[in-house]
Image: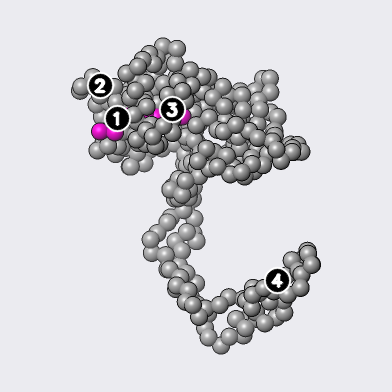
């Protein structure tokens, strides 16, 4: 793969980061090669990728938890069919259903009809999963996928009937996909990026025991001041004259805390101090094992991520 480094003004809502690493596949490489090195598609034609923190499930070691099994039970009576994109009828009724869902979940016209049409008409959607309520015959959900057997399944966009919230339909669809592709010998199921605070919390929770019993620090009062030593490496880096605040010092006056007669505060109790062994099939974040640097002008711009 060819790597390209660029800087741009951050726009996290559109997946543009202050410093970005882009990858372009070379002949003989497939999307699985790039996703395995930590990249996700930035173009729906799978000709440009970006390096990011993203989540995948190691299907070889996945074992459903009691919560996974509970979710699957709530989805009993929902039939699922894997359909190649070429055989999927992207008709006006489905198009409107997907648009209504996107407006509610993502915001009005965040996903335009043009973007929606592009999603179902480009290489990034090779198959779809169709979820149907067996009791009523109604189609209640669709997931767009990019499949590369048996290397990867990329779970891209999910659209579903929000009236099924009591059955946790969205979670059922994802959990069902994990078991489905595991049974078919796929190596990994990729679930997208992991940047929202809740997503980061859940990723950490897979590795650590997180308790609400953590001791909170005492709130800072207006009479509390913290001194900071300005290191010589800082003061010699420019024409430094003197600190602009009395709390920044260049001598050893900050040492008062070391000789204070008061006992030190107790160390906070963090349940995360002791990490539990990583569970089988935990979420993993692949990272690149090779980077090649290229000099670019600051004017270099890359179009927004495909989402």
Contact, mark 1 vs mark 3 (Cβ under 8 Å): no
The dot on residue 112 is: 3
- Circle 1 residue: 161
Q: Nearer the viewer, mark 1 or mark 3?
A: 3
- Circle 4 residue: 230
**In this image, 229 relative to 130: left or right?**
right
276 over 257 or under it: above or below: above
Q: CA distance from mark 4 to mark 2?
A: 67 Å
Q: Residue furthest top?
A: 87
Residue range in magenta is: 156-163
Q: Is residue 274 something that shows in the picture?
A: yes
**In this image, 251 relative to 183: left or right?**
right
Q: Nearer the viewer, mark 4 or mark 2?
A: 4
Count residues near mark 1 (Cα–Cα under 10 Å), then give few for <14, some for 14-19, many for 20+.
some
Contact, mark 4 vs mark 2 (Cβ under 8 Å): no
Judged from the image, the secondary structure of the residue bearing numbered disc 3 is loop
Count residues near mark 4 (Cα–Cα under 10 Å), then give few for <14, some for 14-19, many for 20+.
few
Of callouts 1 and 3, which one flags the residue occurring earlier in the amino acid sequence? 3
Q: CA distance from mark 1 to mark 2?
A: 10 Å
Q: CA distance from mark 3 to mark 4?
A: 52 Å
Whether residue 45 is in magenta: the answer is no
The dot on residue 138 is: 2
Judged from the image, the secondary structure of the residue bearing numbered disc 2 is loop
- Spot occupied by residue 172 in the image (x, y as percentages of width and height): 33, 33
Of callouts 4 and 1, which one flags the residue occurring earlier in the amino acid sequence? 1
Q: Nearer the viewer, residue 100 or 174?
A: 100
């Amino acid at each position: 793969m060819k790597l390209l480094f660029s800087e741009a003004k951050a726009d996290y809502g559109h997946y543009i980061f202050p410093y970005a690493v882009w990858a372009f596949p070379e002949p003989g490489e497939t999307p699985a090669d790039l996703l395995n090195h930590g990249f996700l598609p930035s173009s729906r034609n799978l000709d440009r990728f970006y390096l990011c923190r993203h989540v995948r499930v190691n299907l070889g070691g996945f074992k459903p938890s009691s919560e996974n099994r509970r979710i699957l039970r709530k989805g009993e009576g929902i039939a699922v069919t894997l359909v190649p994109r070429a055989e999927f009828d992207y008709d006006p009724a489905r198009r409107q259903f997907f648009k209504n869902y996107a407006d509610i979940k993502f915001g009005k016209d965040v996903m335009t009809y043009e973007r929606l049409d592009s999603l179902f008409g480009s290489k990034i959607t090779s198959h779809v999963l169709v979820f149907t309520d067996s009791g009523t015959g109604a189609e209640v959900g669709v997931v767009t996928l990019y499949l590369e057997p048996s290397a990867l399944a990329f779970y891209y966009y999910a659209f579903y009937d929000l009236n099924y919230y009591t059955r946790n339909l969205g979670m059922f669809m994802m959990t069902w996909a994990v078991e489905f592709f595991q049974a078919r010998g796929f190596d990994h199921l990729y679930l997208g990026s992991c940047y929202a605070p809740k997503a980061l919390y859940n990723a950490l929770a897979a590795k650590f025991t997180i308790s609400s019993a953590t001791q909170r620090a005492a709130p800072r009062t207006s009479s509390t001041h913290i001194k900071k030593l300005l290191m010589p490496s800082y003061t010699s880096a420019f024409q430094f004259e003197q600190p602009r605040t009395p709390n920044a010092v260049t001598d050893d006056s900050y040492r008062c805390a070391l000789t204070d007669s008061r006992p030190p505060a107790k160390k906070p109790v963090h349940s995360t101090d002791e990490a539990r062994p990583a569970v089988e099939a935990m979420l993993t974040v692949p990272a690149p094992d090779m980077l090649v640097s290229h000099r670019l002008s600051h004017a270099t711009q890359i179009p927004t991520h495909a989402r």
